Image: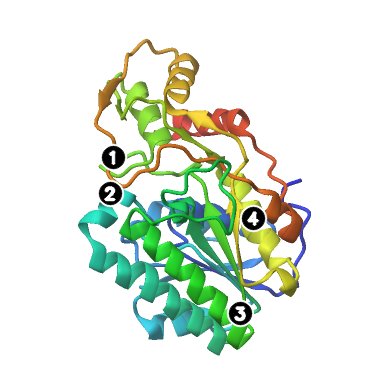
Amino acid sequence: MGYKHLTFEKDSLFLVTGGAGFIGSNLCEALLNMGYKVRCLDDLSTGKQANVDMFLSNPNYEFIKGDIKDFDTCLKACEGATYVLNQAAWGSVPRSLEMPLFYCKNNIEGTLNMLEAARQKGVKKFVYASSSSVYGDEPNLPKREGREGNLLSPYALTKRCDEEWAKLYTMHYGLDTYGLRYFNVFGRRQDPNGAYAAVIPKFIKQLLNNEQPTINGDGKQSRDFTYVENVIEANLKCCAAPSSSAGEAFNIAYGGREYLIDIYNTLTKALGKDIQPNFGPDRKGDIKHSNADISKAKNLIGYDPEYDFSKGLNEAIKWYKENL
């Protein structure tokens, strides 16, 4: 269970792109706590300096302010790196519908820059963030790798392209790549602000401030919400995985299913609030239900998630109460 028992070569250097973001900063923190060297690359367009300020005094930590759209920056960042954990991307399905060109440059070309830089610099393993959005309109639950539908947003398309490029880099260039299809990750340091904020931190913040949250749609949509510790485990298990598992993409979730309205009611209870939600229109490009089959990740990379939804939610609530 978990990842704290994993060991890597003592002088391993982990490059975390998007390392000042929500998932990236949690990866940096976990690796530094395990005693490894960490280089964080972030252009701070969506990541926050405040997420990584606490690491600045750690001699094992290095920060590069730079953009994955710039190939020379990617080469510099990959210099001497043993493992790359590529989290740098712009998220949000609705925002991608408004900015398709930017998403192509940032999420596809940026990832390709990182793949090529990792290849040129002899990186051992390249682990990258994909997304459950690649399943598109495929109606069957649970979602299973190899059974994808029509893509519903530019964001989903960028992640699908990343998977195909990564597969080619394993096939033709011998770079061990591992794609992680994240399912609705939540937890500490996830930003509750802005129009595209994720639902759990947004609800928590609004309820703590005695504001009335808006639920998009009828609240009967379901998601496989995944606590961030499970995602850290998946990234590090890929770094320890055999090369025979490379070139693949894996569902990273807990394998459960929570309805939005139930989560809302759980939060009001946990926070001692009696506030009825407002119901708004469905979000464009969103899927109605999402639930993951995680057996492939269990079998090929030894993924064994420790945090179910309620355990993760309790941790998240505690963190937001202390930090908002």
| Residues at marks 4 and 1 touching, judged by CB atoms closer than 8 Å | no
Vertical side of 102 occupied by 259: above or below: above
Seen at 70% across and 41% down, the residue is: 306
Task: Give the residue type at disc 2.
Answer: Pro
Q: Quadrant of the C terminus?
A: top left
Mark 3 vs mark 4, foreground winner is 3
Find disc 1 in the rendering and name its residue.
Answer: 283
Find disc 3 in the rendering and name its residue.
Answer: 170
Q: Is residue 35 visible?
A: no
Label 3 crowd (10 A; few <14 / some 14-19 / many >=20):
many
Task: Give the residue type at disc 3.
Answer: Thr
Left/right placement of residue 181 relative to residue 320 reads right
| Residues at marks 2 and 1 touching, judged by CB atoms closer than 8 Å | yes
Whichever of callouts 3 and 4 sits on the residue coming sooner in the sequence is 3
Vertical side of 98 occupied by 168: above or below: below
Please name whichever residue, 29 or 256, is drawn nearer the observer in this view of the structure.
256
Find disc 2 in the rendering and name its residue.
Answer: 94
Find disc 4 in the rendering and name its residue.
Answer: 234
